[in-house]
Image (cartoon, rainbow, N blue to C red):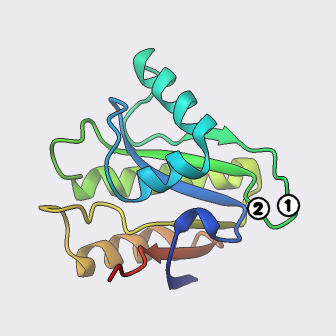
């Protein structure tokens, strides 16, 4: 089941949040910036892992959290969907990354996740393409998925 919501992804009440990243540690605008502000330790861990070349494309880099509140997430799944921030994500990288994400959720006993629309940066994929990729990836996963669009700014 996929629910659509708008707002800040880091404020969602789920077990895990998905942070779309690249393999080089380049901070990009959008969700990655929201994650850096809300979870600075995650950003430090991610950058360190990038420098040590421990972030393979399409494999979630998991950062466990110590929830201060009962409804806060237990994990951040940093999902590399492209090698660098200079080029848009490719659909096949997103598909493979989501398959690995579903496996990681099963391994860790996670039942609910929130993620932004992956690959929709300027020059990237359109909404119809993203929606099909997400629907296919999560159709039989048993996960409660919240797809979070950024809040509209005036």
Residue, disc 2: 72
Residue 33 location in percent, x, y? 43, 51
SS state under label 2: loop
Quadrant for the N terminus, please.
Answer: bottom right
Residue under the image location 35 percent in, 62 percent down: 118
Q: Are marks 1 and 2 in contact (CB under 8 Å)?
A: yes
Residue 32 location in percent, x, y? 43, 51
Which quadrant would residue 120 be assigned to in this image? Answer: bottom left
Residue under the image location 24 percent in, 36 percent down: 84
Q: Does 70 sit left or right of 54 as displayed?
A: right
Looking at this rendering, what residue extends furthest in the top direction?
52
Front-lying residue, 67 or 117: 67
Residue 50 location in percent, x, y? 42, 24
Residue, disc 1: 69
Which quadrant would residue 153 be assigned to in this image? Answer: bottom left
Residue 136 location in percent, x, y? 41, 73
Quadrant for the C terminus, please.
Answer: bottom left
Residue under the image location 26 percent in, 78 percent down: 127
SS state under label 1: loop
């Amino acid at each position: 089941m996929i629910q659509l919501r708008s707002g800040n992804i880091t404020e969602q009440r789920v077990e895990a949040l998905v942070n779309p990243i690249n393999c080089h540690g380049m901070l990009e605008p959008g969700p990655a910036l929201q994650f850096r502000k809300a979870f600075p330790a995650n950003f430090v861990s991610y950058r360190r892992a990038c420098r040590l070349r421990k972030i393979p494309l399409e494999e979630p880099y998991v950062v466990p959290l110590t929830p201060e509140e009962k409804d806060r997430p237990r994990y951040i799944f940093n999902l590399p969907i492209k090698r660098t921030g200079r080029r848009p994500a490719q659909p096949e990288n997103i598909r493979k990354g989501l398959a690995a994400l579903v496996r990681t959720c099963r391994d860790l006993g996670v039942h609910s996740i929130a993620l932004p629309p992956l690959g929709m940066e300027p020059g990237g994929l359109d909404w119809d393409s993203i929606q099909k990729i997400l629907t296919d990836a999560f159709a039989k996963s048993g996960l409660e998925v919240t797809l979070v669009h950024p809040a509209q700014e005036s």
